[in-house]
Amino acid sequence: MLIQSKVQLEKKIYEFIKNSYKDLRYKSLSEYMRDAINIKVEEDQKRLRELKRVNAMKMIGKAPYENLFESIEGDDFENR
């Protein structure tokens, strides 16, 4: 389902889109705008996922950890 929204563009960008969407084989001006916005949103989503991944890796490095093998440390397993 599509949702209508207003978008403000610079005049020179609008004129370019208006004059070239047919040459680029888009059905309508709206289709060109939707396609351009969708491409930008996908790029931004990838960039945000990467930022979240980097921040998560930094947080993992800062988190304290407990030694799970502390209770058996020093045991001689070869002679059991």
Image (cartoon, grey):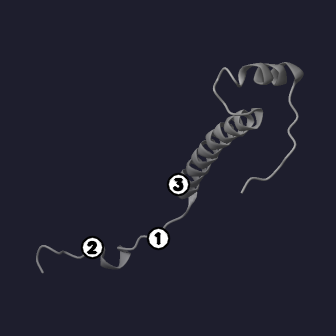
Q: CA distance from mark 2 to mark 1?
A: 17 Å
User: Residue 72 location, x and y as percent?
Assistant: 30, 78
Q: CA distance from mark 2 to mark 3?
A: 27 Å
Residue under the point 64% across and 38% down: 39
Mark 3 is on which residue type?
Answer: Gly
Label 2's element? loop
Query: Mark 1 = which residue?
Result: 66
Query: Mark 2 = which residue?
Result: 74
Query: Mark 3 = which residue?
Result: 61
Q: CA distance from mark 1 to mark 3?
A: 13 Å
Task: Characterize the local packing of mark 2: few (<14), some (14-19) or many (20 or more) Cα atoms within 10 angstroms.
Answer: few
Q: Which numbered disc, 2 or 3, marks the residue closer to the eye?
A: 3
Labels 2 and 3: the sequence-earlier one: 3
Is residue 64 toward the left or the right of residue 30 in the image? left
Residue under the point 39% across and 74% down: 68
Labels 2 and 1: the sequence-earlier one: 1
Q: Quadrant of residue 13?
A: top right
Label 3's element? helix
Residue under the point 83% across and 20% down: 15
Q: Which numbered disc, 2 or 1, marks the residue closer to the eye?
A: 1
